[in-house]
């Protein structure tokens, strides 16, 4: 099989001809139809996260081994199944749930494998979808598409799931209050679309890029504010109609975290999702004085992905802009993502 592998952090991906995997036990092999290029791939490619104050989290120190085939937003056709697989069959086209844990620890037993301390995530800790074939550890991680387009659906394995899980953490307030969504990249546009599908009151989106703000408005945002404007906070308050009860930061920089926090009403809630990097900017006394909740949200669990696909099958989730590129353009696509040249999502095909 042809795979595009990361062999050196920050370096170009290299094509490799590897043996096509053969499944055993509960394993399944899919022929990749589509794989999304996610901002998390960019961090893996660079090999680090910025923790602020000059500190870096190096992925080589966190169990990420090279060479690695990235790609965790994968959809494809089942071409082989292990002898113990009873619930999936050859020929089915499925979305792959990538956030796989050890299966034994407390969070895994609770169904939150995405929070496992011994992860086996596809495209992160084991080879992923930047390839024409992919080995999946268990058939339960494959969700049939039932005729849905693999190219359109692949980003739901991370972009969609991540925003859906974050919106769920805000609870019923999303149906009563406008949600402040910071960041209008692939996650932000997906968030606007899924919020609408969940019956939310609507989103006020913040982004420093004019083309992304325009895309957010086209996707159905109630307003789009330039985060770099001197009066951005006032514009946000005006668009929300007052202090903010619900905010999601899909960027995760000191500037965006500060904007989200400052916008919160007393008792409001800020969900931190983005991994841009830096240190928290909040004045500590104001956290109890405002009685706010700041909660992290990392991807989502398998049950949530099933719930999200049910919404998609009903036609409730509007489509987001998707550009299609060949797998051979993986390095170029990562570079475009790093430089902010991509509006929406890029999905690669073999």
Image: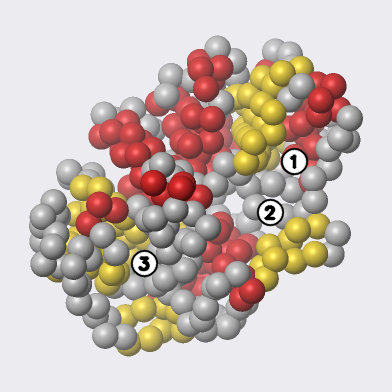
Residue 156 appears in the rendering: no
Q: CA distance from mark 3 to mark 2?
A: 23 Å
Instruction: Identify which residue is drawn at 41% across, 78% down.
Output: 4
- 8 vs 212: above or below: below
N-terminal label among 3 and 1: 3
Dot 2 lies on which element? Answer: loop
Instruction: Identify which residue is drawn at 69% across, 28% down.
Output: 293
**Considering the image in quadrants, where does the N terminus appear?**
bottom left
CA neighbours of label 1 inside 10 A, class few (<14), some (14 to 19), many (20+): many
Task: Left or right? Give the position of 332 relative to 74.
Answer: right
Q: Nearer the viewer, residue 297 or 246?
A: 297
- 131 vs 185: above or below: below
**Label 1 near label 3: C-beta < 8 Å?**
no
**Label 1 near label 2: C-beta < 8 Å?**
yes
Q: Mark 1 sits on what residue? A: 256
> Horizontal and vertical percent for residue 260?
73, 32
Snapshot quadrant of residue 130: bottom left
> Horizontal and vertical percent for residue 99?
42, 55
Dot 3 lies on which element? Answer: loop
Q: Nearer the viewer, residue 230 or 140?
A: 140
Instruction: Identify which residue is drawn at 55% across, 12% down.
Output: 176
Q: CA distance from mark 3 to mark 1?
A: 31 Å
> Horizontal and vertical percent for residue 131?
34, 73
Dot 1 lies on which element? Answer: helix
Q: Nearer the viewer, residue 90 or 200?
A: 90
- What label sits on residue 129 in the rendered view? 3
Q: Mark 2 sits on what residue? A: 276
Q: CA distance from mark 2 to mark 1?
A: 10 Å
N-terminal label among 2 and 1: 1
Q: Nearer the viewer, residue 162 or 193?
A: 162
N-terminal label among 3 and 2: 3
Residue 247 appears in the rendering: yes
């Amino acid at each position: 099989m042809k795979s595009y592998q990361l062999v050196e952090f920050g370096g170009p991906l290299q094509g490799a001809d590897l043996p096509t995997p053969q499944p055993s036990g509960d394993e399944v092999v899919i022929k990749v139809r589509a794989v999304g290029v996610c901002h998390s791939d960019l961090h893996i490619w660079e090999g680090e996260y910025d923790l602020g104050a000059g500190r870096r989290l190096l992925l080589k120190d966190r169990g990420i081994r090279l060479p690695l085939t990235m790609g965790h937003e994968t959809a494809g056709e089942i071409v082989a199944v292990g002898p113990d697989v009873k619930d999936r069959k050859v020929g089915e086209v499925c979305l792959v749930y990538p956030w796989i844990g050890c299966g034994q620890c407390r969070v895994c037993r609770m169904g939150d494998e995405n929070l496992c301390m011994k992860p086996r995530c596809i495209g992160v800790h084991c080879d992923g979808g930047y390839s024409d074939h992919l080995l999946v550890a268990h058939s339960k991680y494959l969700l049939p598409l039932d005729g849905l387009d693999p190219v359109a659906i692949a980003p739901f394995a991370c972009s969609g799931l991540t925003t859906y899980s974050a919106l769920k953490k805000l609870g019923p307030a999303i149906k009563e209050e406008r949600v402040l969504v910071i960041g209008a990249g692939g996650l932000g546009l997906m968030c606007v679309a899924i919020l609408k599908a969940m019956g939310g009151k609507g989103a006020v989106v913040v982004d420093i890029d004019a083309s992304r703000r325009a895309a957010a408005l086209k996707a159905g945002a109630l307003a789009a504010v330039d985060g770099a404007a001197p009066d951005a906070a006032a514009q946000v308050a005006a668009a929300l109609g007052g202090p903010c009860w619900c905010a999601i930061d899909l960027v995760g920089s000191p500037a965006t975290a500060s904007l989200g926090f400052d916008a919160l009403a007393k008792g409001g809630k800020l969900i931190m999702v983005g991994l841009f990097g830096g240190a928290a900017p909040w004045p500590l006394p104001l956290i109890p004085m405002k009685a706010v909740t700041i909660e992290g949200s990392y991807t989502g669990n398998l049950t949530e992905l099933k719930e999200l696909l049910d919404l998609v099958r009903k036609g409730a989730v509007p489509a987001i802009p998707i550009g299609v590129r060949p797998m051979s353009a993986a390095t170029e696509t990562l570079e475009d993502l790093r430089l902010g040249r991509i509006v929406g999502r890029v999905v690669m095909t073999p």
